[in-house]
Image (spheres, rainbow, N blue to C red):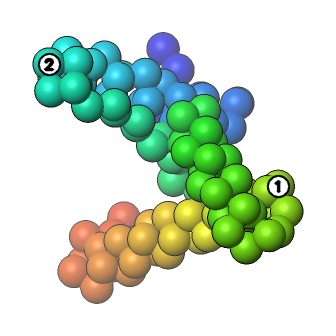
Amino acid sequence: TVSNIQAARLEPGATAKKLEEQKKKKHAQDCVINQIRFLPFGMETFGALGEDAKGILKRLGAALAVERQSNQIEEYKMLSESVSVACMREVAEGIRNMHMAGDAPPDDP
């Protein structure tokens, strides 16, 4: 069995895609019953996006491009980078908090 970390290393975005698929299966019936369109946003620790997440950002980028009269591809890149940086900041903050609480793994000798 390949771990999520191994899968992400071998194919960036694979773990995020798997997460999106799992969330769709988990929430599909409730969404149909409640007439809700569910769009999972899968993202790996270091910023790789799932296909649904990419689609969401592409649609947002297109809307921004129209509003700003700018380039859709550049808007998508800006959104992707902003989301990735926000994710990495949260990971760093979590590591820092673990370290401050004394829960961090020991340093390698």
Looking at the image, which residue is at 56% across and 64% down?
A: 83
Image coordinates of residue 4 in percent, x first then y, are 49, 32
- Please give left or right for residue 62 compared with residue 37 in the image: right
Residue 71 image point, x, y percent: 85, 62
Q: Is residue 37 above or below residue 88?
A: above
Q: Is residue 70 left or right of residue 85?
A: right
Q: What amino acid is labelled 1 in the image?
A: Ile
Residue receiving disc 1 = 73
Q: Is residue 61 above or below residue 67?
A: above
Residue at 28 percent of width and 85 percent of height: 100
User: Could you tell me residue 85's position as x and y percent?
Assistant: 59, 70
Sooner in the amino-acid sequence: mark 1 or mark 2: 2
Tag 1 and tag 2, C-beta contact below 8 Å? no
Label 1 crowd bin: few (<14), some (14–19), many (20+), radius 10 Å: few
- Can residue 24 be seen? yes
Amino acid identity at mark 2: Ile
Residue identified by numbered label 2:
33
Q: How packed is label 2: few (under 14 Cα within 10 Å), some, or many (20 or more)?
A: few
Q: Residue at x 82, y 55 (%)?
A: 73
Closer-to-camera residue (60/79): 60
CA separation in Å, label 1 and label 2? 36 Å
On the image, which quarter does residue 74 sit in? bottom right
Q: Nearer the viewer, residue 80 or 104?
A: 80
Would you place residue 106 above or below residue 31 in this image? below
Looking at the picture, tell me which residue is in the foreground, 89 or 49: 49
Q: Nearer the viewer, residue 61 or 21?
A: 61
* Mark identifier at residue 102: none
Placement of 15 over or under 65, stated as above or below: above
Where residue 81 sits in the image (x, y, percent)? Answer: 68, 65
| Local SS, label 2 | helix
